[in-house]
Amino acid sequence: MPQALTLPTESHCANCGAVLQGEFCHACGQSVRSVLRPVHGMLEDTLDLVANWDGRVVHTLPPLLLRPGFLTLEYFAGRRVRYLAPFRTMFLLCLAAFFLLPMALDTGGAADTPMKVTVAGASFQDAKTPAEVDRLLKKQLKQFAPTEQIPVVGSLAAQQLDKARLQLTREAMQRRIELGDTTAVVPQTVADLPALPAPRAPSEAARHNPLDMAWDAQKYPVHVSWLPDFLNTRMNRSLQRMHDNLAAMRGPGDHSAVKARLLGQVLAALPGTMFFMLPAFALLLKLMYLFRRRLYVEHLIVALHSHAFLFLCLLLGVLFQLLAVALEPHAPWLSTPLGWLINALWIWAPIYLLVMQKRVYRQGWPMTVLKYLVVGWCYCWLLAFAILGAAAMGLAE
């Protein structure tokens, strides 16, 4: 049978009966305020929580950006209430930075750029003989396959491919005529173009290579004997998606939409991947300062504040970039100072991390610089593997 709600007395906690010494019980932590209050009282508590959170943001972000090691030392000293918790700070800045990063990387307008026919960095105008023109034309036509043999190609994409092939051939024939070749004929329509040679059948090794265009997970599945069947099935499903994404990027036509989608998938996988870098970075610090008798959690706090600072720099850099693009039509002169600010962030980041390591671990400059370089070198390799892992996960989506 459920018990009736017990209201607190003036001197004892309603939950554990301990003698009260303030607004919260010192034994169980329960508030002395009753939950049975008017709605305006609950709204006041919500506003107070938001205002307190905003105050902690004001006290956290400026020293995080400008005072290396300050927040970490404050946390170690027990002065934590007025600042955001290290994990929450890093988590919020990470989400904000990777949310805005795709906007800064979006160049836009790639599909509307007129096509310029070039051959290995040189146009047909650089050819000196008709034979050289033919050689360059054959080299360029190798990237085109017959449109009816391209899987899942729409009619619009097929038309664009045929137009590109027609433009390429016409420029080659015009150059041959300029060089005095009387046998050259400039094609007028796609029907006047010679048929493309049929592609050669892929080799048996290519059929079993997931990175080759001829591979298919249904016909040539990858099987690892010591893995259970459901993991082999899931692995082949991911490999098929990765194969399809790579084929879409390597295939003919406009790749801007495909690249934008894949970039979004990779960036979506990066925040989760970066969380694996935190314990690894803390472990590197633990190994470097093994004889300093510090707990692993202390190194983890240093890692959290270090990554929070890096995400804050990334966030500010993205905001400055977006601001420069938005103000370009109205105040182009602001692009230069905003570019200076972005460069200042890039310069400040390694200096900040070095000074932070010096202030937190309190060693001399020679040992600090040496350990900083070793940790940085190892971390760069770990970060490269993490980015490759995020890219693989993005391609497999």
Image (cartoon, rainbow, N blue to C red):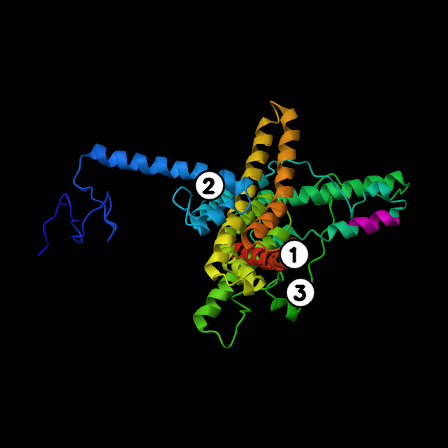
* Residue 343 x, y percent position in the rendering: 65, 38
Residue 373: mark in rendering: 1
User: Which residue is drawn at the image coordinates 20% and 47% (left, top)?
Assistant: 20
Cα–Cα span, label 2 and label 1: 28 Å
Question: Pointer 1: residues within 10 angstroms few (<14), some, or many (20+)?
Answer: few
> Mark 3 or mark 2, which is nearer the start of the sequence?
2
* Residue 146 x, y percent position in the rendering: 66, 52
Callout 3 secondary element: loop
User: Which residue is drawn at the image coordinates 73% and 53% (left, top)?
Assistant: 142
* Residue 284 x, y percent position in the rendering: 56, 61
Specify whether residue 132 is painted magenta.
yes
Residue situated furthest bottom in the rendering: 225
Q: Quadrant of residue 319?
A: top right
Q: Nearer the viewer, mark 1 or mark 3?
A: 1
Label 1 amino acid? Leu
Q: Are marks 2 and 1 in contact (CB under 8 Å)?
A: no
User: Which residue is drawn at the image coordinates 69% and 58% (left, top)?
Assistant: 198
Residue 261 visible at all: yes
Specify whether residue 48 is painted magenta.
no
Q: Would you say 332 lies left or right of 262 here?
A: right
User: Which residue is drawn at the image coordinates 55% and 38% (left, top)?
Assistant: 316
According to the image, label 3 marks what residue?
Answer: 201
Callout 2 secondary element: helix
* Residue 271 x, y percent position in the rendering: 49, 51
Q: How many numbered dots are placed on residues in this image?
A: 3
Cα–Cα span, label 1 and label 3: 51 Å
Start-end of magenta stretch: 131-137
According to the image, label 2 marks what residue?
Answer: 60
Q: Nearer the viewer, mark 2 or mark 3?
A: 2
Question: Pointer 3: residues within 10 angstroms few (<14), some, or many (20+)?
Answer: few
Asked if 325 appears above or below 69 in the picture, the reply is above
